[in-house]
Amino acid sequence: MSGVAGKGIHDVGGDPAPACDPDDHPHEYWERRVDALMVLLSGAARSPDVAAASRAGAALLRVDQIRRQIEALGSRAYGEMSYYERWSHAIAGVLLESGVITTAELARCMEPRAAAPGGSAGAGS
Amino acid sequence: MTAAAVDPAFRVGDRVRVRRSDPPGHVRTPFYCRGHSGTVERICGRFPNPEELAYGRPGLPPIPLYRVRFLCRDLWPDYAEHPSDVVEIEIFQHWLEPAAAPAAPIGAKR
Amino acid sequence: MNTAEAGAQGYYRRLQAAVEELLILKGIVTREAIDAEVAAMEQRSYRRGAQVVARAWVDAQFKARLLADGSAAVREFGFEIGPMHLIVVENTESVHNVIVCTLCSCYPRMLLGMPPDWYKSIEYRSRVVREPRAVLREFGLVLPDAMTIRVHDSSADMRYMVLPRRPAGTAEWSEEALAGLVSREALVGTAVAARHQSDDNSPV
């Protein structure tokens, strides 16, 4: 990534880069769930009616916080992690920062389980 | 405390220059346009400051957001494609100054 | 990442499952809400944008409203797009528009669904503001030399969709048939709408 001081690793407009690959891949199910959670937590699907949105309560997080987390990853992680891995990392990071969840709670939930009570250990195929 | 609303400082057609500034934090002014001049294409409205939203702060009062049109040949010294090609970028008011003004970078050491 | 049914899951998949579970346990979201949003996102696709384009092609007043206020016109058309601020930019015989988010991957998701891999790639984000025609050639699009390109960098609160030019020879076509001519790439500007898909993807 760029070594120019003051230029974020994500700020790539104008950088030399290889040819584009026009191909696409279908999103995996867990990636769709990351996306969906992002929409819910950031209020991206809310009505543009400001009054209704404020009655429903403020969004739990802002996409700007997510972006900041991703931009702070460091060039190696940024380059090696997939798009939704970066989002997943960032969502957890913002929720930890704001105290919605704690590291201890996450650790308990991330422990591998032999069975999946209520299907909670897996997000599907 | 709610600060007073920020009035738009620029109008459509104004020549503006992007501050040559390079702070850390979450910035939505792409590096490649900093220090360059363009023309205000439209005023998009007023929006909370993403630099503050990124840290969980409200980013108020909302700041005028502009779309600024840059000639590619101004952005890239060796631009080899069409001379009328442009890049249009959304830039917040606090990153813009009149193009004719003496450069006043914020916090830059160089 | 492999999608093994059981056994080893990727670290971030495991993290994501744990975050979901915690948020559900804490009553912050429900599983049903996540499931519903997954389903809603699957319904959002470039086909919605294609329908809007087709309407603009047959209805000049709708087109004018679309270009003046993209969000209002899309809501008028009937799509729920949340608080998105949409700007629709029109391709003409002299101007071709291309959309990018150099800083991340901002895209009109609430209308068009999830963006394609190439749109999110460092290659596209780096180069399309620097050498747009070279990038478009990699997508099979060759523009006439006299055309001007407008690249829109979606750097803040706006989101963008291209209104491609209506192909010649479609004057009697239904909206449904017209919408079938509009690809996801045409809405971003890496293709044009064409009656026949050809290798050089030349504009009609």
Image (cartoon, rainbow, N blue to C red):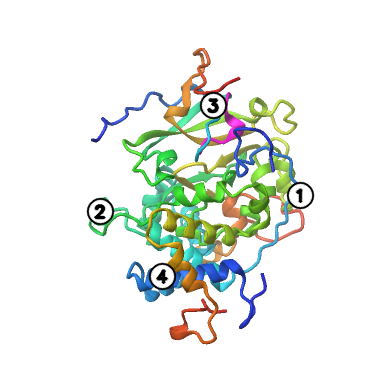
- Residue B2 quadrant: top left
Foreground of the two, C123 or A2: A2
Q: Amino acid at mark 3?
A: Ser
Location of residue A45 (image quadrant): bottom left
User: Which residue is denoted by mark 2 in the rendering?
Assistant: A54
Residue carrying label 1: A19
Q: Residue furthest front?
A: A104
Q: Quadrant of the N terminus of chain C?
A: bottom right
Image mark 4: chain? C
How far is the residue under mark 4 from the one under mark 2?
A: 25 Å
The residue drawn where x is 64% and y is 76% is C3
Q: Which residues are magenta?
A: B28-35
**Mark 4, mark 3: which one is toward the viewer?**
4
Q: Which mark is residue C22?
A: 4
| Chain name for mark 3 | B
Subunit of label 2: A
Q: Nearer the viewer, mark 1 or mark 3?
A: 3
Residue B96: image location, x then y, percent = 47, 25
Q: Are marks 4 and 2 on the same chain?
A: no
Q: Residue beneath label 3, please?
A: B21
* Residue found at x 71% / y 25%: B77
Instruction: Name the residue nearer the viewer: C156 or B58.
Output: B58
Locate residue C46, reporting x and y percent: 54, 61
Q: Chain of mark 1?
A: A
Question: Is residue B31 in the magenta section?
Answer: yes
Same chain check for tags 4 and 3: no
Mark 2 or mark 1, whichever is nearer to me: 2
What amino acid type should be assigned to the residue bearing mark 1? Ala
